[in-house]
Image (cartoon, rainbow, N blue to C red):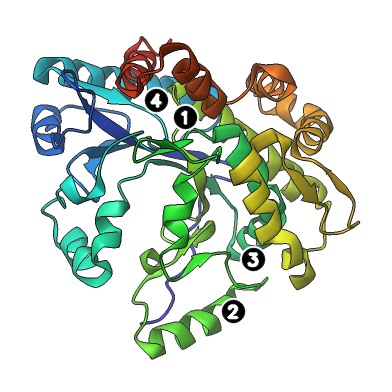
């Protein structure tokens, strides 16, 4: 199977996907209610889609093509409201967060869809352990080579996205010590991690042909990379974020990615090399473990600094591009998070420290997500 042609797309357009928890309103554990939610939403006109995920206690919403932050907020809000309405009819809750704090993977049911059943057969128990919840952001690129250049430039900011979105400190009833424990589940899959260093679509096509010749992969869907090209959409897809606790936070993170993309494509501030990835895994781990307090290494200068400092420095550098995209308000909110308000992992820990009861934490995080999106 050959690599498909890279489609044309509106440069710097956005698409946002959010995987959500379906919550019992009795014990606040996960509830296998995705088929019922999809039945209620069938035929409803939305600006995007609501689709199943790997297990029946998950649901995914995705926007259509968004031109910018305001458009993303509007689309996410409309889909959010439709999902909340359907959930209330079924007397279930919905929640953000990268992990459910105390669900047990063995109790999860694989959604009855051929691809999910095939993955379950291939990956065994890992499929049910993959009941974790992430945000994916698609960024439109004008052509394939620009997409690969953007992918490798934006890879150095992967720790930023992890720390800003981190919302998975609890797993199986325990505080893991991580800000984002969700990504530890993703690491277990083969073909996860980083994309190969290719800067031309021709070169990437040769890599793809070698991989398909081995029989290990059949399509781009088989790669679980942190960022991957999506040629059928004409985008790159950033896949490392936990699902935030609100759609507002999800839209702000997408706006940050779009603004970075504009800076990279307009100013071309980097000349990416394979050596940029020498510190990639270290920086990624620091973000997952310590969030804004992690220590990261600049791949070009080898300078060490806190992730908090690195994000603040980058946000200031992006100001003119954020204004051009009408995303400056969104980035100011992220600036407040980094500057002291904290991320969602901090909110979850503070709520648990106050309540001392994980079901109450889930009740409150569900209430946050179910609140009006505006």
Q: Are marks 4 and 1 in contact (CB under 8 Å)?
A: no
Q: Residue at horizontal 37%, vertical 68%?
A: 222
Instruction: Report the residue marked by disc 2.
Output: 202
Whichever of labels 4 and 3 marks the residue nearer the N terminus, that label is 4
From this view, report whether residue 168 is shown above or below residue 213: above
Work out whether residue 108 can be spotted: no
User: x and y percent of residue 317 in the render?
Assistant: 83, 34
Secondary structure at numbered mark 2? helix
User: x and y percent of residue 249 in the render?
Assistant: 52, 24
Work out whether residue 303 can be spotted: yes
The residues tagged by marks 1 and 3 sit, at their Cα atoms, a distance apart of 31 Å
Indicate the quadrant where residue 188 lies. Answer: bottom left
The residues tagged by marks 4 and 3 sit, at their Cα atoms, a distance apart of 30 Å
The residues tagged by marks 2 and 4 sit, at their Cα atoms, a distance apart of 36 Å
Whichever of labels 2 and 1 marks the residue nearer the N terminus, that label is 2
Whichever of labels 4 and 1 marks the residue nearer the N terminus, that label is 4
Q: Residue at horizontal 64%, vertical 34%?
A: 256
Instruction: Report the residue marked by disc 1.
Output: 244
From this view, report whether residue 204 is shown above or below residue 98: below
Instruction: Report the residue marked by disc 3.
Output: 145
Residue 17's label in the rendered image is none
Secondary structure at numbered mark 1? loop
* Disc number lying in front (2 or 4): 4
Q: In this view, does 109 lie to the left or right of 269?
A: left
Instruction: Report the residue marked by disc 4.
Output: 76
Q: Are marks 3 and 2 in contact (CB under 8 Å)?
A: no
Q: Residue at horizontal 16%, vertical 46%?
A: 107
């Amino acid at each position: 199977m050959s690599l498909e042609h890279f489609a044309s797309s509106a440069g710097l357009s956005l698409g946002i996907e959010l995987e959500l928890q379906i919550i019992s309103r009795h014990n606040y554990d996960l509830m296998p209610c995705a088929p019922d939610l999809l039945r209620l939403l069938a035929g409803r006109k939305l600006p995007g889609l609501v689709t199943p995920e790997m297990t029946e206690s998950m649901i995914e919403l995705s926007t259509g093509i968004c031109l910018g932050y305001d458009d993303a907020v509007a689309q996410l809000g409309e889909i959010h409201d439709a999902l909340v309405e359907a959930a209330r009819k079924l007397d279930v809750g919905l929640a953000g967060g990268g992990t459910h704090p105390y669900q047990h993977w063995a109790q999860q049911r694989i959604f009855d869809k051929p691809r999910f059943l095939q993955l379950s057969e291939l990956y065994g128990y890992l499929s049910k352990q993959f009941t974790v919840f992430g945000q994916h952001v698609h960024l439109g690129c004008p052509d394939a080579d620009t997409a690969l250049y953007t992918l490798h430039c934006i890879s150095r900011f992967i720790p930023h996205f992890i720390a800003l979105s981190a919302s998975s400190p609890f797993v199986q009833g325990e505080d893991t010590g991580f800000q984002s424990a969700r990504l530890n589940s993703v690491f277990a899959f083969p073909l996860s991690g980083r994309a190969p260093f290719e800067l031309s679509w021709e070169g990437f096509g040769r890599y793809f042909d070698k991989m398909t010749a081995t029989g290990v992969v059949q399509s781009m869907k088989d790669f679980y990379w942190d960022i991957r090209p999506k040629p059928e959409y004409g985008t790159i897809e950033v896949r490392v974020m936990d699902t935030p606790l609100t759609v507002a936070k999800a839209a702000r993170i997408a706006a940050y990615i779009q603004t970075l993309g504009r800076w990279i494509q307009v100013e071309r501030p980097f000349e990416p090399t394979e050596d940029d990835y020498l510190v990639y895994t270290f920086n990624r781990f620091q973000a997952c473990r310590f969030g804004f307090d992690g220590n990261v290494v600049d791949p070009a200068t080898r300078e060490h600094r806190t992730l908090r400092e690195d994000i603040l420095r980058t946000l200031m550098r992006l100001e003119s591009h954020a204004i051009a995209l009408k995303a400056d308000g969104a980035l100011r909110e992220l600036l407040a998070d980094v500057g002291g308000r904290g991320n969602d992992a901090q909110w979850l820990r503070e709520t648990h420290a106050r309540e001392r009861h994980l079901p109450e934490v889930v009740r409150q995080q569900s209430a946050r997500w179910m609140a009006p999106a505006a």
